[in-house]
Image (spheres, helix red, strand yellow):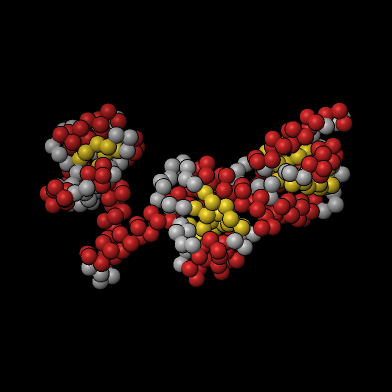
Amino acid sequence: MVQFHIQADSDIPASKQLFDQIHFAIATRQYPPNHRLPSTRQLAALTGLHRNTISKVYRQLEEIGLVKSQAGSGIYVKAQGHEGGNQLSSPLLEEHPLAKNIVTKSLNEIMAQGFTLAQAREFFISEIDWRLHCSTKIVVTVPTRDMGAGQLIANELEQSLQIPIQLVSTEELPQLLELGNSGTVVTSRYYIREVLEIAAPKSVRVIPIDIYDYGKEIEIIKKLPHNFCVGIVSISRGILNIAEIIVHSLRGDDLMVMTAETFDQNKLNILVRAAQTIISDPASYSAIKKTILQQRDNLIRPPQVIISEEYIGEKSINMLKRELGLGVNEK
């Protein structure tokens, strides 16, 4: 980080001292072209100057063409001469200097390995074409025994990615891949090994999805009273199996655990009458609510219903968006 030193008792105005030091840092490439300069808040903390003074210095630098302001992003060192690329420079890259820096750095690293510009261009084009191909179609696959989990994944991906999603069982996946144009295959990390065995020989990209960690629900289960009855409802048989194991490992025989798949109305009726707390995935909530209304005459007190968050973790969604070139809104 460039160090700034402002002499408060100097005859030279503080703004002039800062202007000259930034100008020097740019001239010596301590601040290279397209580098983002410190914010006025950061510089105020470093120099002790008022932010208005720093803003004035930045305006002066902009007026002489050394820096440029990007609305909502900050102040950047302006490329000069050949650094700007003249007429061959991409306007899009000029508008996004951070992205330009990434592209430039990647290109330099490739060429440092001994490859030519033409070869580097081919690398970029091949990777972009591959990702465009893979983003044209998303296939979600899980074993037939847990199609409910596949439905959760497909529903949430369709909502997040805003592109068509096809759901197939792992048993049907080989026949689908034989048809070609399969795009990207997505599955739960639980089933990644068996899906890779099918897809890898056909050079199809497979991306595993990390599921929600259920940390909030686990904390609730830890605090439930002894001999309490907790119900777990999901459209995924796999989730129910895992949930029973986790609850037992946390509480042993302290709790009575009842599970029901969303569409098993008989089990759902029994569970609603017996459970004091019900934990549900989002897709099952409407069925539970309907069942509680139907059973209200048989209930001393309606059970508390806790709706879990989305099945897929936010990090997994963002990772998938990056892989598909769909853009990510990071928090």
Between 203 and 331, the one nearer to me in the picture: 203
Q: Quadrant of residue 270?
A: top right
Q: Going 83% across and 29% down the picture, which residue do you hit?
A: 296
In the picture shown, does residue 224 fall above or below 324?
A: above
Above or below, 80 against 9 in this view is: below
Q: Which residue is at the front of the view, 132 or 272?
A: 132
Q: Image check: 246 left or right of 175? A: right
Q: Of 191 and 199, which appears nearest the observer?
A: 199
Residue lying at 56% horizontally and 44% vertically, measured from the top left: 156
Q: Is residue 258 above or below residue 54?
A: below
Left or right: 51 in relation to 12 = right
Could one spot residue 126 in this view of the protein? yes
Residue 95, horizontal then vertical, whole percent? 26, 42
| Residue 1 spot, x, y in % from top left | 30, 49
Q: Nearer the viewer, residue 153 or 322?
A: 153
The mark total stands at: 0
Report whether residue 319 is seen: no
Q: Residue at x 57, y 48 (%)?
A: 154
Which x, y percent locates residue 173?
57, 62
Query: Is 104 on the left or on the right of 179, as rendered?
Result: left
